[in-house]
Image (spheres, rainbow, N blue to C red):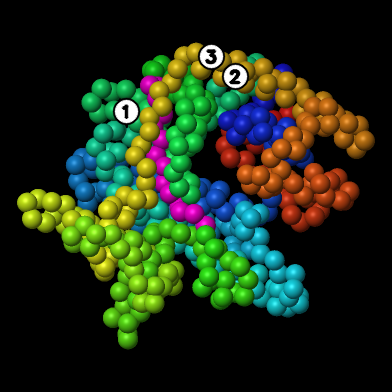
Amino acid sequence: MGNKVFTDRSRVEQAQRCLRARWLGYHEQGMGIQSVRKSLPLAVGGAVHEGLAVLLQAASAVPGAHNDPIACVAFEQDAVNAALADFASFDAGRLETDLSEDVDLSAMDAGEREKVRSAIDQYLYDENRALVEAMVRAYARRRLRPLLEQYEVLEVEREGSWELADGLMFMSRPDALLRDRSDHNLYIQSFKTGASWDIRKGKDAEHDAQGLSEGVEIEKRLGERVLGIRYEFLWKGERRRDKDLSARFGVEARSQASPLVRGYLSPGMTDSDAQWNWSWDYMKEGGETSKLYWKAWRAAAVWEHMPIAKWIDMLDATTLTVGEEGREVGWSGPAQATGFTVAHPLDACFHPPIIQYRNDDDLRDWVEQVEHAEVRIAEAVATVHAATDEGEKRHLLNVYFPQSRRECVYPSVCQFEKICYGGEHIRYNPLESGLYTIRIPNHPQEDAKDASEGA
């Protein structure tokens, strides 16, 4: 195959969804291209991952941290800083929501349209910046210590690669490598951010190739079996239509329905009189269920009223009230002025970890299938790059990298939809449109020279 060619799980899965998107994302212009706008879920998820990596790395370096609650949160601010720095790489105008959330501004004149669009973009940025911080702080408070109590963290986001075929290198970077403190087995740690839980997420983990692919490099390097992959899910909340926000901007708008960034506020006469509830539904002391009175309480963006760190402190201070004869009444605290709730507000933002054990038959099937597919793709890439004119290149793309046309706009809009179905100019010169730029490599093993020769 000549010079080294690089691939990874993201490329494999992109090819399985749409070969044309695989070409555009990883091979066009040598390195591949990407949208200058970042998908909102990817921006939030990536930033949270950066924070959690710092948190794991720092806490695991402290001897006995798993037995010390203070040590477990000592590096919380460092983790938050790392997460926010990553999120800051995308300014307010470069975050892209789902197509279903597109705002119709066609009835406005150009000046008003620009003003409203800018205000919505800024609100979206501020809201999700607060969410990133809150998710990292919540994990530090409620989930880090249980992980450290059960596992020793051996590695965090260690880059690795292994030879899938002659000259074809498979790159990987697990979130973390863990060793169980009791039986000493190895596990890969995987963080997943999502809107909310449904059974499909659990079933999807059963077929996820992440543990298969990332485990290969570890086993080859350490000569030790990786027993399984440990998934932890962090919930961002759904994005729901918001009447108050719609009235504020004059168009239909949505907000993040998460207790990490939104609560219910009763303002009072002064700021010191303000009261907050994190949950609209609550229980009375006798166990009866009820709801807040809608005339007294309104949903409010927490970050517009206080620092997120203060709000997480309030949520974290929630305690379980025990009544007569040891009966659990419910959870209450400074973030729930009215009644009691069934769950701790921070625990409600996580799903219990799921462990998926690795299977030798699944691993063999995956390796053989991916090797065959990726060798063929590498050969096809070299053929397309050797094309001498645009007409020949277009023909070869149609032969080797056809469009699937099945995932262009659902479940989310493909970043290359404008290229595939746009005018002639953007189809042949996507970079000149200003909507795309050369892809930034996700792994340091690949560089522009390697990519231009067939990555």
**Above-or-below relation of 454 to 321:** above
Q: Report whether 306 appears left or right of 414.
A: left
Q: Position of residue 291 (x, y in %)?
A: 33, 65
Q: Earlier in the sequence, mark 2 or mark 1?
A: 2
Question: Can I make out residue 14 in this image?
Answer: yes
Amino acid type at circle 1 is Arg
Magenta span covers which residues?
Answer: 226-239
* Extreme residue toward the bottom, this view: 269
Q: Earlier in the sequence, mark 3 or mark 1?
A: 1
**Above-or-below relation of 432 to 408:** below
Q: Secondary structure at mark 1?
A: strand
Indicate which disc residue 179 carries. 1
Q: Report whether 193 appears left or right of 310.
A: right
The quadrant where residue 170 appears: top right
- Quarter of the picture holding the C terminus: top right
Crowding at label 2, few (<14), some or many (≥20) Cα neighbours within 10 Å?
A: many
Crowding at label 1, few (<14), some or many (≥20) Cα neighbours within 10 Å?
A: some
Q: Which residue is mark 3?
A: 364
Q: Which residue is mark 2?
A: 164
Which residue is painted at 44% across and 34% down in the image? Answer: 202
Amino acid type at circle 3 is Arg
Q: Secondary structure at mark 3?
A: helix
Q: Secondary structure at mark 2?
A: strand
